[in-house]
Image: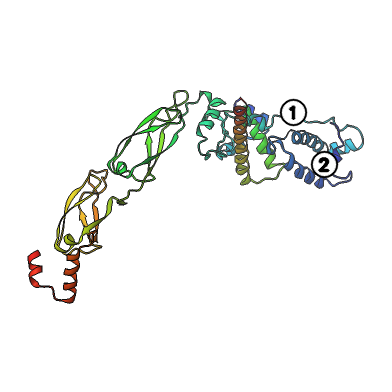
Amino acid sequence: MRTADFLMQARLDARAVDAWVMSGWLRPGGDLAGREFSDVDLARARLITELRGDFGLNDEAIPVVLDLIDQVHGLRRLVRALMERSRS
Amino acid sequence: MASDPYTVLGVKRDAAQDDIQKAYRRLAKKLHPDLNPGNKAAEDQFKELSAAYDLLGDPEKRARFDRGEIDAAGQERPAQGFYRDFAAGGGHAYSSDAGFADFAGAEDIIAEIFGRQGRANVRRRGADLHFHLTLDFLDAINGGKQQLTLPDGSSLDVAIPPGIRDGQVLRLLGKGRPGLNGGPDGDALIEIEVREHPLFQRIGDDIRVELPVPLADAVLGGRISVPTPDGPVTMKVPKWSNTGSVLRLKGKGVPRRDGTRGDEYVALKIVLPEKRDPELERLIAQWQSGTAAPSHASAEA
C-alpha cells in the first residue's frame, strides 16, 4: 500500500512514520519518491504504537524490544525447521 | 468470552480510572501476543483483556456498562493482525538470524531454512564449509599439494603454500556449498594444524635445530652434516666451539611469500664418543694434571 493508505490504517501521522523509517524501526519497500508498505509494516507499526502507548516504553527501548522480538521469531523459525527436519 | 471486565482486569468496581490503566498495562506487558509468540492462551487472554480495557478504559463506556446499557461482549475490538502473525513466516524486511548466526556448523541448515522460506527469489551466497587439515612439519615448510577427504567421500586438492603456519586458515574460493538462485558459491575454509618435528623447531620464519658435535670437531674444528628442511648440508664448525654456541645457516629457514627465506640456527651440543676410549681418558688425565706433552697438541693440530 502507498503511504496515504498506510497512514490511515495505522492511524499515524506522516511525521511519526518518517521518524520511524529513519530510525529503522520500519523498513518499507519502494524509495523516497514513493514508499510501499506491506501488511508486515502495518502490523509492526501497530506494535510500535502499542509499545509506546499502552506499554509506556520510551523511544530508546523500542529498537531493543523490536530487535529481540525479531530474534525470537528467527529462532522460532529455526526451531520449527529443525523439528520438521528431524521428523522427516 | 464475555467475562466480567472488572474480573479480567483484576480491579474493584469502584477502582479509579488511573488504576484501571495501570492494571491494564501490567497485564498487557505479560500477555501481549508479540511478547509471547508461542503461547496461544496468552493471545486469548490478551484479547479478553483488550476488550475489557476498551470498555473500562473509556470513562463514558464504563459508565454505560455500569448502568447495564451495554454488555461486556458488545465492544470487542475488530480482529487486528498481530505482528507475530506476519513475523512468524520470515522472508520480510525484519527477518533476523542474529539469534543464532554464530552457531558453528549451522550455516548450511540456516542457508537451507532461509533459502526455502521466503527468500526463495533472493540471490544468496552458498554457505562456507569448514575443514581441518593436519600437516607434517616438513610439508608445512616446503608446501605442496595435499588431498583432503570430505565427509561425503569426495576429495579436494589443496595447494599448500610453502611456509604455512599452524592455525592459519586457507580459503578455497567457490569450494563451499553452491549458491542459491545464481548467487556465488561459498568457500571452503581449511584450518591448518602443523605437527611437531623431532629435530626442528620453528620460531617465526627461522628454524632452530640442536646438533650433536663430536668432541674432536668441537675442539679442533671440522665439517659436519646438518639437517635442514631441504635436506642435509655440510657446515663448518670453527675450532673450539662450545656447547650452546649457535651457528647460522643463512637462507635455510622457512620460505616467505616474497621469495626470501628465514635462517636456520644450529645450536651445538658437544657429545663424547659412545664407547669408552681409554686413550682419550689418559690424554685428558694428562691434560688435567698439566703433564700433557706439548708434542701431542702440536701433532693433532
Residue B79 numbered tag: 1
- Splitting the image into 4 quarters, where does residue B13 fall? top right
Q: What percent of the width, then of the height, locates residue B255?
A: 26, 45
Residue B34 numbered tag: none
Q: Residues within 10 Å of mark 1 (few under 14, many from 20)?
A: few
Q: What percent of the width, then of the height, locates residue A60?
A: 61, 46
Report the residue at 50% width, 36% height from top. B105
Give me the chain letter of mark 1.
B
Q: Left or right: B203 with respect to B11?
A: left
Q: Left or right: B64 with respect to B260?
A: right
Q: What percent of the width, then of the height, locates residue B164?
A: 32, 43
Q: Secondary structure at mark 2?
A: helix
Q: Residues within 10 Å of mark 2 (few under 14, many from 20)?
A: many
- Between B221 and B245, the one lying in front of the other is B221
In the depicted structure, whether residue B60 falls above or below residue B19 = above
- How far apart marks 2 and 1 lie (CA) works out to 20 Å
Earlier along the polypeptide chain: callout 2 or callout 1? Answer: 2
Residue B9 numbered tag: 2
Q: Given the image, on which type of amino acid does mark 1 rest?
A: Ala
Residue A32 visible from this viewpoint? no
Q: Given the image, on which type of amino acid does mark 2 rest?
A: Leu
Q: What percent of the width, then of the height, locates residue B44?
A: 77, 33
> Which image quarter holds the C terminus of chain A?
top right
Give me the chain letter of mark 2.
B
- Splitting the image into 4 quarters, where does residue A10 fall? top right
